[in-house]
Amino acid sequence: MQKVLVPLASGFEEIEAVTIIDLLRRADIDVVTACLDRRRVIGAHGIKILADTHIDDIDYREFAMIVLPGGIPGATNLRDNQTVQDLLGKFDKDNKYIGAICAAPIALANAKVLKKAYTCYPSFENQIENKGYLPDQVVVSDQNIITSRGPSTAIAFSLDLISKVCGEDVAQNIKTQLLLV
């Protein structure tokens, strides 16, 4: 069974985090949520999630992918956390998948793992020096980096992540279960 790491920072976007966690688990992916400080992490809209573990206790070698939910200040907390930045560098060096949605590509840019083409929540491209912003794309894959725009694109993003880890057939099966035609 493949493992995916989802760091949760205070102020994460709940729709994105829960959609990613839920859909990947439906695909029988072992999703591990990791907090940056306290295990009970509060999202941008007051929803509380109990993380599985602490980010400092992660061995990145166990994971096929790391996925960052957006939200403010969640994305800036991920960007400013040295452990997250180090993990992003290690995942990239080993050519493992890295996903980021909404404002979270700012954390990828800060870690210098963002490739040329990407998308993000509109206006956050202004915080990213990379000029490969694709504003009209729902999901953008460039090498091992997968990015998406925001809460309304979380299902499409999650399905793309599933296809990367488990294959297109599994992603299509989850899409069918969700009644996405």
Image (tube, rainbow, N blue to C red):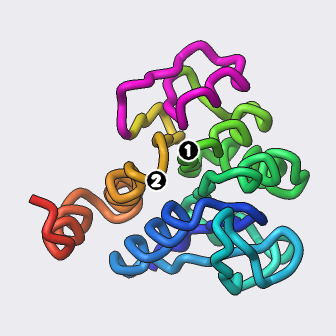
Q: In which quarter of the view is residue 122 placed?
A: top right
> Which region is colored magenta?
117-138
Mark 2 and mark 1 in contact (Cβ < 8 Å)? yes
Q: Say which label, 1 or 2, has the lower sequence index.
A: 1
Residue 137 forms part of the magenta stretch: yes
Q: In which quarter of the view is residue 27 placed?
A: bottom left
Image quarter hosting the N terminus:
bottom left
Give, as a three-letter code, the residue at label 2. Pro
Kindly identify which residue carries mark 2.
Answer: 151
Q: Circle 2: is it few (<14), some (14-19), or many (20+) Cα within 10 Å?
A: many
Secondary element type, mark 1: loop
Q: Is residue 30 above or below residue 127?
A: below
Kindly identify which residue carries mark 1.
Answer: 102
User: Which residue shows up at 47% across the image and 40% down it?
Assistant: 149
Q: CA distance from mark 1 to mark 2?
A: 7 Å
Give, as a three-letter code, the residue at label 1. Cys
Residue 161 forms part of the magenta stretch: no
Q: At which x and y percent is residue 38?
A: 86, 79
Q: In which quarter of the view is residue 123 placed?
A: top right
User: Which residue shows up at 54% across the image and 76% down it?
Assistant: 31
Q: Is residue 55 above or below residue 111?
A: below
Q: At which x and y percent is residue 164?
A: 38, 54
Q: Circle 1: is it few (<14), some (14-19), or many (20+) Cα within 10 Å?
A: many
